[in-house]
Amino acid sequence: MPNSSLYLLNLFLIFVRVLSVLMTAPIFSHRGTPSLAKIGLAGLLSLLLLPAEANTKIPVSATLPRDLPPFLLVIAQEILIGVLIGFASNLVFIAIDVATKIMGLQIGFQAATLFDPMSNAPTSAFEQFYTLLALTLFLTIDGHHWLIAALARTFEIAPLGTFVLTQLTIERLMLLTNEAFVAAIRIALPIIGTLMLMDLGLGLVARAVPQVQVFFLGIPLKMALGFLVLALTLSITLPLVKELLADMVTNILVITGG
């Protein structure tokens, strides 16, 4: 097959993987990012990655137009690995989202949610605060550069047309998901623990002094105490979130078999 045709084929498959990542990765997958911008960035990154992939061996059955089914299988492989890379890079934000929902439920913010057109789901100001905080940290530590560097590294670990979803990959995916939920509990633990102790204290007060309207007293107390704990533990939470974001590259390489 002529080199020019092979290069075009490589370029197309690289574009498929890169675009799949950009459609699912943090920052790039945001609904506020125009689709044309994602496609243009995917095309630019594909051109930059093409020289490194010039010698990638494409399966023979996928190199000729008459072998359409095998070629479609290769495209599906690239979409799959791109989505998995995006999912791995999003695990930190999934953990933060779960943590903020738990904390918001404990404090009482879940009753004051608004529809967010960007996420297409109801959200609270508390959740938006943590999400924007994580995104700011992501950009501050050059997380978007790390993501692109990790994406380039995946072409060495899993060359075009060679990725296969094995049992080991599924086990690694489940392990990383489990770690994300553990991280969510670690982020939410200070507020969960404090408010549980407060509920216990209010229960004792209600038992000892039945005349006290614990229900009406508890709501403002929970909010005030929740904000206080949030302010006091933010210096602990931020390094934890930065640590989780720093593990993003490792997560991507683990998912792709590195």
Image (cartoon, helix red, strand yellow):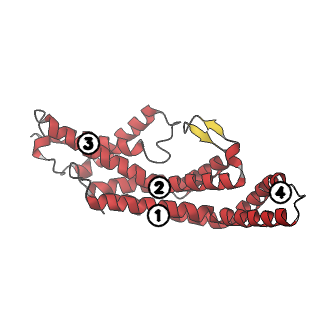
Give the residue pinned by disc 3: 76
Element carrying mark 2: helix
Q: Is residue 229 left or right of residue 96?
A: right
The type of residue carrying mark 4 is Val
| Mark found first going from the N terminus, 4 or 3 | 3
Spatial separation of the CA atoms under disc 2 and disc 1: 9 Å
Give the residue pinned by disc 1: 179
**Mark 4 or 3: the one toward you:** 4
Residue 47 shows in the view: no
| Mark found first going from the N terminus, 1 or 4 | 1
Q: Position of residue 55 (x, y in %)?
A: 18, 51
Q: Quadrant of the N terminus?
A: top left
| Mark found first going from the N terminus, 2 or 1 | 2
Give the residue pinned by disc 4: 214
Residue 57 shows in the view: yes
Q: Is residue 23 left or right of residue 2?
A: right
Kindly check if marks 3 and 1 are in contact, taking CB atoms under 8 A apart as contact: no
Q: Nearer the viewer, residue 160 or 165?
A: 165
Q: Residues within 10 Å of mark 4 (few under 14, many from 20)?
A: some
Element carrying mark 1: helix
Picture residue at 11% right of the left edge, 42% below the top: 61
Kindly check if marks 2 and 1 are in contact, taking CB atoms under 8 A apart as contact: yes
Give the residue pinned by disc 2: 91
The type of residue carrying mark 2 is Leu
| Mark found first going from the N terminus, 4 or 2 | 2
Spatial separation of the CA atoms under disc 4 and disc 3: 58 Å
The type of residue carrying mark 1 is Glu
Spatial separation of the CA atoms under disc 2 and disc 3: 22 Å
Q: Position of residue 176 (x, y in %)?
A: 42, 61
**Mark 4 or 2: the one toward you:** 4
